Image (cartoon, rainbow, N blue to C red):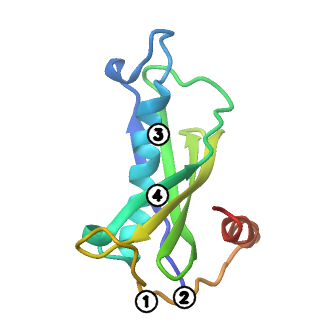
Amino acid sequence: MKVKEFTIYRLIKSEDLNHHGTLYAGRCAEWFVEAGFIAASDLSSPNNTVCLKIHGMTFTKPVHRGDTLKFSSKVIWVGRSRLVSYVKVTTKEEDFLVDGFITFVHVDEQGHAVPHGISQIEPETEEDKKNHELAQNLR
């Protein structure tokens, strides 16, 4: 199965900053999960998709007011009830900032994990192949 890649841009405003005058990590985490959710809910109903875990977010440099961030996301692996999105964040100039995986679970009306019925994803690029392998081992 071929999956879509989604892109979201965010302008960093004063209300997004911490007491050091740089992007508050919690705000970035919110956008990070949102980007991953958009990719996951393209394959699974948004009403039945919940976030289980963020697998790491290590920033490589600070982000300042007025900067623009690009969040690129795609589902990179599917299990029986799980979907794993890979999210990569870069600056407007395409400088790498942070990346990571987010596990989502397909649930029923009572919140119990149930099979989503999505067929396996075939990685297309070398980066996708590497991330597909990494995602298989996430717990």
Residue 7 location in percent, x, y? 45, 56
* 68 lies left or right of 99: left
* Residue 130 x %, y %: 76, 67
Q: Nearer the viewer, mark 3 or mark 4?
A: 4
Q: Which residue is mark 3?
A: 29
Give the CA distance from mark 4 to mark 1: 19 Å
Pointer 3 with pointer 1, Cβ within 8 A: no
Residue type, numbered disc 1: Gly
Dot 3, how many residues are within 10 Å of its Cα: few (below 14), some (14-19), or many (20+)?
few
Q: CA distance from mark 2 to mark 4?
A: 23 Å
> Measured from the top left, where is residue 17 in percent x and y?
42, 19
Report the Cα–Cα distance between label 2 and label 3.
Answer: 28 Å
Label 3, label 4: how far apart the Cα atoms are:
14 Å
Contact flag, marks 2 and 3 (Cβ < 8 Å): no
Tell me which residue sits at (60%, 23%) in the image. Answer: 62
**Mark 1: few/some/many CA within 10 Å (<14, 14-19, 20+):** few
**Residue that carries the numbered disc 4 in the rendered image:** 52
In front: label 4 or label 1: 4
Check disc 2 and report the residue beneath it. 1
Above or below residue 76? Residue 86 is above
The kind of residue on which mark 2 rests is Met
